[in-house]
Image: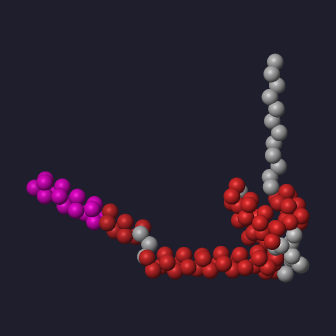
Amino acid sequence: MAEDELEAIRRRKMELLRQQQQQQMPDPQVAAQQEQAMAEMEAKKQAILRAILTPEARERLNTLKMTKPELVASVSDQLVTLAQSGRLQGKLDDEKLRNLLIQIQPKKRQTSITRK
C-alpha cells in the first residue's frame, strides 16, 4: 500500500512539472509575432535615425554601439522620441552628437594611489 501511495505522489508531481513546463514555454506563433513586431519597430527606429542624423553621426553611433550598446540604445531612443515629438529641427551632425554623448555619459572618478 505504501508503494502505491508513493507511485501516486510521483505521478502527481510529474504531472505538475509537465504543466509548469508547458506554461513556461511560449507558443511558437506568439513568439514569432512578437519577434516580427520587434523587427518592425527596430526598422522604423533606424529609418527615423537615418532621417535625423548625418552619415558621420550614424557612423559614430554604430562604432560606439560595439563598446557601449546600452548607451547607444538610450541615446537613439531619446533621439527618436525628440524627432517624433517635433523638438528636433534639422539633422544632427557629428559635432552635436559628440557633445550630446559627452553630456549623457556619467562622469568618471579619478583615483590615485599614493605610495609611502
Q: Position of residue 65 (x, y in %)?
A: 71, 61
Q: Residue at x 19, y 61 (%)?
A: 8
Q: Quadrant of the N terminus?
A: bottom left
Q: Is residue 39 visible?
A: yes
Image side of residue 74 versus residue 33, left or right: right
Q: What's the image's color scheme?
A: secondary structure
SS assignment for the magenta stretch, majority: helix
Q: Against 109, is 22 above or below?
A: below
Camera-side residue of 62 and 23: 62
Q: Is residue 72 visible?
A: no
Q: Residue at x 77, y 66 (%)?
A: 59
Camera-side residue of 75 and 54: 54
Give the residue at the far top of this rendering: 116
Image side of residue 33 versus residue 74, left or right: left
Q: Quadrant of the C terminus?
A: top right
Q: Position of residue 109 (x, y in %)?
A: 81, 42
Q: Position of residue 42 (x, y in %)?
A: 65, 75
Q: Position of residue 69 (x, y in %)?
A: 69, 60
Q: Residue 88 falls in which quadrant of the image? A: bottom right
Label count reads 0
Camera-side residue of 113 and 14: 113
Q: Would you say residue 114 sits in the magenta stretch?
A: no
Q: Which residues are magenta?
A: 1-16
Image side of residue 109 versus residue 19, left or right: right
Q: Residue at x 41, y 69 (%)?
A: 25
Q: Residue 29 falls in which quadrant of the image? A: bottom left
